[in-house]
Amino acid sequence: MKLKLSKLGVLLGVPAIVGGFAAAGQPDQPLVFADQGREWTPQLRAALYVQDQGSQLIPLAWFEALTQADGKPFTEGALARFGFLPNPQAAHGDRLPVGFSLADSQQGPMVGMTCAACHTRDIKAAGVTYRIDGGPAFADFQSFVLDLDAAVRRALASDSSFKSFAEGVLGGEAAKPAAVMALHDSVALWSLRFHTWVGQIPTDRPWGPSRLDAIAMIYNRVNGLDLGPAPTYMLADNMAIADAPTRYPFLWNAGRQDKTQWGAWAANGNEGLAVARNLGQVFGVFATFHPGPKTSATPLDHDYLSTNSSNIPGIAAAETILARLGPPVWPFPVDHALAERGREIFNRPAAQGGCVECHGVAEGEPRPPNAHSWRTVSLDAGTDLHQWQIVLRSARTGMLEGATVPGVVGPLQATDLSLNILKAAVTGTIAELQAAQAAAAQAAAPAAAPPEAKAKDDQAKADAAKGGMTAPDATVPMTHEDMQNTMQVPDMPPKVQKTADEKPADPAAHPPGTFVYEARVLQGIWAAAPYLHNGSVPSLTELLKPAGQRVKSFKIGPAYDTQAVGLAPDQAGNFTLVTTGCEDRMSGNSNCGHEYGTQLPEDEKKALLEYLKVL
C-alpha cells in the first residue's frame, strides 16, 4: 500500500465531551475530565482519541466477527476487560475504545491503534473517576494481543469455526467457495505472522497493566516481520524475548524535551524529530511496512514507500494536538502553606535532598526552528538496567542489507544493531517522502493555481491551523541534522555485540554512567504512578524511601491513594507486580535506585510530597 497522504483523520465536529456521565460498567462512578489547561479542548481530546497514524492491526470486519472463548463477541464492552477506556463519542464506540482508529485500506475499514491507547488513563478516588489525557494507561496490552491471537486461531481451528467467521465477514459472499478460500488464506497469513510475534512475550513473567516492552516489540515487528521475503516477509530468528517492560510515559510536555525515550537515546524538541519518534512507534504498533530493493522511482538505494501504511500527516497532526495538552491539575484539597515549604525543599541542591537539578525546567539544546527546548538530564541513578540489553540487540538486516541514508545511517551490515535498522527504516521513509514531495512541487511549479483555487487552499490551511492540525499537504519539516540525531547509540568503550548469535550486551559490564535514563520535568507527576522507568515503585511516598525499604510487591490499577500520591494498595484487578531489589538490577523489575530525598526528615518528605501534587 502506498504511503498515506490523504486527508487527516481528525474529528473536529463531534459534540463536546464533558464530565458527568457514568464510566462504563460502573454507574456509581461519575467521569470527570481533569483540568489540563485552557488550550486543551473537548474537540482536541476527541480528535486525539481516534487520530489515524497508519497503524493497521486488523480489518474491522474480521475484528467484529471474532469471538471470545465463551462465544461472546471479541469486541464486547469495547475491550474494557483489557483496561482500555470507553470512547462513546466515536464511530463504533460500543466496540472500539479510546486509542483505536479506523482508516480506509484495500481490505476495507482497518482497525489501528493510536498513541491515546497507551497514553490515556482513568484514576479512581473518593467515588469519582478522573480522566487523565496523556497519562500512562492501565491497559493490559499483553493480555489483549495474546487473546486476539487466540481468537483468530480459534476461527481457523476447524471448517465449522471458520464457516461461522466467514459468514460474519463476508455476509452473502460466504456462499462462494472462492471468496471463502481467499479469506482463509489471508487470515492464515495474518495469524502466522501475529502468532510468531506474540510468541516473544514471556507469559511466565507477565508485563501486567500499565507496562509494555515497547522497544523489543518494535524491534521484533521490524526485524522479524518486515525484512524477509514475500509472502510472509518474516525473519523469525530475528525476534527475541520481550522481557524488559517499562511504564508508558506521560505525554504532556513531551515535545519540549531535548531528548526522549527512557534511555534518552533519541533527540527531541521540534516537529521533525517528533514525526521520526512517532513513526518508529507506528512501525511497532502494526503499520504495514515492507522495504524493498531500489526502483527507478526511488531516490535512495532501497524503496521505503511502496509498501508503507504510515500516515505522516496524521502523525504530525497528533503531535500538534498534543502540543496543546497541559499537565493535569491536582483535583483534591491542598495544604498550600505546606506545599510552599515543599517548593523550597524541591529547589535545594541534590546533595541536600532537592530535585531541581534533574527535574526542574532549564534551557535545553536548541532544536531549530524552535527557539527553546527543555533540558533532559540523563544519568545512571542506580535503577534497573535490563532495558539497555534490549536497546543494544542486533539482528540480520535482510532486505535492508547495505541500506544507506546518506550522511545519516549505513551502509547496514548483514548483521547490525537493531537501533540502526530502525533508524534506517524511519529516516529512509522520511527522506524518500521528502524527495517525492520536492519532485511533485517542482513539477507543479510552472502552472500557477487560479486565484479561486489558491484562496480555497489558503482557507483550508487556516481552518486546519485553528483546530490545531497540520495541513494535509504539509512537508515533513525534518532537516538532515535532525535525521542524524534521531536515534543515537551511546558511546561505549567495551565491545558491543555485532552478531545475532551472541548474547545481548551486558550493561553491568560497562563503566557506571554509560547506560543512563532520562529525568523529566515533574509537572503532573502525581498522575503518573507507578514510578521509575519500569514502574517498579507504586507511589511517591514509596519512592522517597530507601530502596531496601520499598514494598516488594503491589497491585497495579486505577484506584488512587491521595495520601501516598500513587497507587492504592487495593485494586479491582488481580495482577501483582513482584519486584527485585538492588541485588538484581538486571531483572527488568528491580526497584533499586533513585535514592534522592530518601534521607530527608519525615516532615520534609511530607512537605515535598505536597509540592509535587501541585507541579
Image (spheres, rainbow, N blue to C red):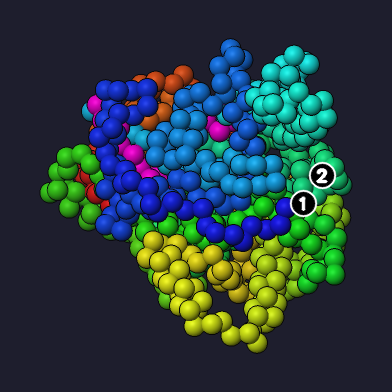
474 vs 370, left or right, is: right
Q: Nearer the viewer, residue 117 or 439?
A: 439
One can see residue 223 in this view: yes
Q: Earlier in the sequence, mark 1 or mark 2?
A: 2
Q: Residue at x 73, y 60 (%)?
A: 305
Q: Which residue is mark 1?
A: 290
Q: Quadrant of residue 189?
A: top right
**Above or below: residue 445 compared with residue 21:** below
Q: Residue 351: x and y, percent?
A: 36, 55
Q: Residue at x 65, y 24 (%)?
A: 168
Q: Quadrant of residue 150?
A: top right
Disc 2 residue crowd, few under 14, some 14–19, many 20+, Cα 10 Å: many
109 vs 155, left or right, is: left
Q: Amino acid at mark 1?
A: His
One can see residue 380 in this view: no
Q: Is residue 175 magenta?
A: no
Are the two marked residues, 1 and 2, in contact with CB atoms closer than 8 angstroms? yes
Q: Nearer the viewer, residue 110 or 178?
A: 178
Q: Residue 484: x and y, percent?
A: 65, 69
Q: Residue at x 74, y 20 (%)?
A: 162
**Above or below: residue 133 compared with residue 539:** below
Q: Amino acid at mark 2?
A: Tyr
Q: Which residue is mark 2?
A: 233
Rounded to the nearest whole Å, what is the CA distance between mark 1 and mark 2?
7 Å
**In the image, which residues are magenta?**
127-143
